[in-house]
Image (cartoon, rainbow, N blue to C red):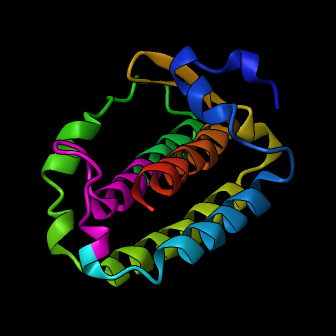
Amino acid sequence: MNTDNYPPYFHQYIEKVPSGDPIALLAEGMKESLRTLVLMSDDQANHRYEAGKWSIKEIVQHLIDTERIFSYRALSFARGEKKELAGYDHEAYVQHSNADYRNLKELLEEWKTLRQSTIQLFKSFSRGMMEHVGNANGLDIGVEQLMYVIIGHELHHMHIIHTRYL
């Protein structure tokens, strides 16, 4: 994986991605995340390590939202979309997510189902499709790069959960 071609903002995620087959990394990442989160109670998942910080449920919802958006971007670019795709305000999405009022088990089931879909989506792309580049939020990024950002983004937030919440 060549990290030189990533927009600088994404380096914080990409640098966390280990070497290996990215499809396997997507599957293994989900298993690891579920191992950490599945035994938590809803009360534990509503915990904030500091006032104004997201709860664990909000982090999970943020991971779901971001994976959906980045998968859509990958699909769009793989299919040859030439228009710039809009960015999104992750803070506003979390604020309006209602995550703390959802059941953690349901959030995890939703994320698990989404991950299966994400894996199938990336497996469906030809090598040529994986090399397509598009623009989202004013940044050029490739389909394959988006897959690695999804992996690294999950690793980033799970590290935060391990170091600040558990």
Query: Residue visible at 38% across and 22% down?
Result: 137
x, y (%) of residue 87? 33, 29
Above or below, comparing residue 157 to residue 132 in the picture: below
Above or below, comparing residue 137 to residue 92 in the picture: above
Quarter of the picture containing the N terminus is top right
Question: Horizontally, is 77 left or right of 4 in the view?
Answer: left
Query: Residue visible at 45% across and 69% down?
Result: 111
Res. 90 image quadrant: top left
Is residue 61 shown in magenta?
yes
Quarter of the picture containing the C terminus is bottom left
Along the viewing direction, whichever of 28 and 39 lies nearer the viewer: 39
Above or below, comparing residue 51 to residue 26 in the picture: above
Is residue 92 shown in magenta?
no
x, y (%) of residue 59? 35, 55
x, y (%) of residue 108? 42, 75
Query: Residue visible at 74% across and 57% down?
Result: 25
Magenta span: 44-67
Question: Horizontally, is 63 left or right of 155 in the view?
Answer: left
x, y (%) of residue 115? 55, 67
Question: Horizontally, is 96 left or right of 33 in the view?
Answer: left
Query: Residue visible at 47% across and 81% down?
Result: 38
Res. 7 image quadrant: top right
Q: Number of callouts in the render?
A: 0
Above or below, comparing residue 57 to residue 1 in the picture: below
